[in-house]
């Protein structure tokens, strides 16, 4: 029983790790070059824009609603 619980936790952890490693579309230049540099901090390797987003994803529904673009 405890084994099943552990697997579930690891799966969730892997999902977060994959999201952190994933590259995302840049809101400024549109290239697939956005990477996470710090907690909720994202940068585009193509145009160099740095912006705040979600902890594990650059764009969350909350962030979009707040309109956090400082460009
Ligand atoms: Zn860019």
Image (spheres, grey):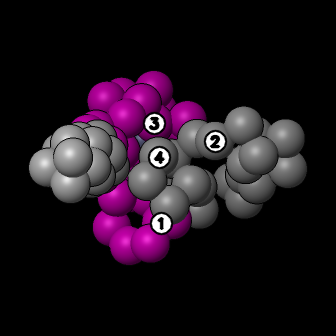
**Quick one: quadrant of the C terminus?**
bottom right
Q: Tell which circle, 1 or 2, labels the residue nearer the N-terminal end.
A: 1
Separation of residues labelled 1 and 2 (CA atoms):
13 Å
Give the class, few, some or many, for how many residues have Cα within 10 Å of label 2's Cα (few <14, many ≥20).
Answer: few
Give the class, few, some or many, for how many residues have Cα within 10 Å of label 1's Cα (few <14, many ≥20).
Answer: some
Q: Which residues are magenta?
A: 19-44
Q: Is residue 24 left or right of residue 53?
A: left
The residue indicated by pointer 1 is 41
Foreground: disc 4 or disc 1: 4
| Residue 3 percent location from the top left of the image | 14, 49
Q: Tell which circle, 4 or 1, labels the residue nearer the N-terminal end.
A: 1
- Above/below status of 69 relative to 22: below
Q: What residue sits 76% from the left and 54% below the top?
A: 68
Q: Is residue 23 magenta?
A: yes
Of residues 14 and 33, the one drawn nearer to the viewer in this rendering: 14
Q: Are marks 1 and 3 in contact (CB under 8 Å)?
A: no
State yes or no: Cβ of the residue under disc 3 lies below 8 Å from any atom of ligand 1.
yes
The residue indicated by pointer 2 is 60
Q: What residue sits 85% from the left and 41% below the top?
A: 65
């Amino acid at each position: 029983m405890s084994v099943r619980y552990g697997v579930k936790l690891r799966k969730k952890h892997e999902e977060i790790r994959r999201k952190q490693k994933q590259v995302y579309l840049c809101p400024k230049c549109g290239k697939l070059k956005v990477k996470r540099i710090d907690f909720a901090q994202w940068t585009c390797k193509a145009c160099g824009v740095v912006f705040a987003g979600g902890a594990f994803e650059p764009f969350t529904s909350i962030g979009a609603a707040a309109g956090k673009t400082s460009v």
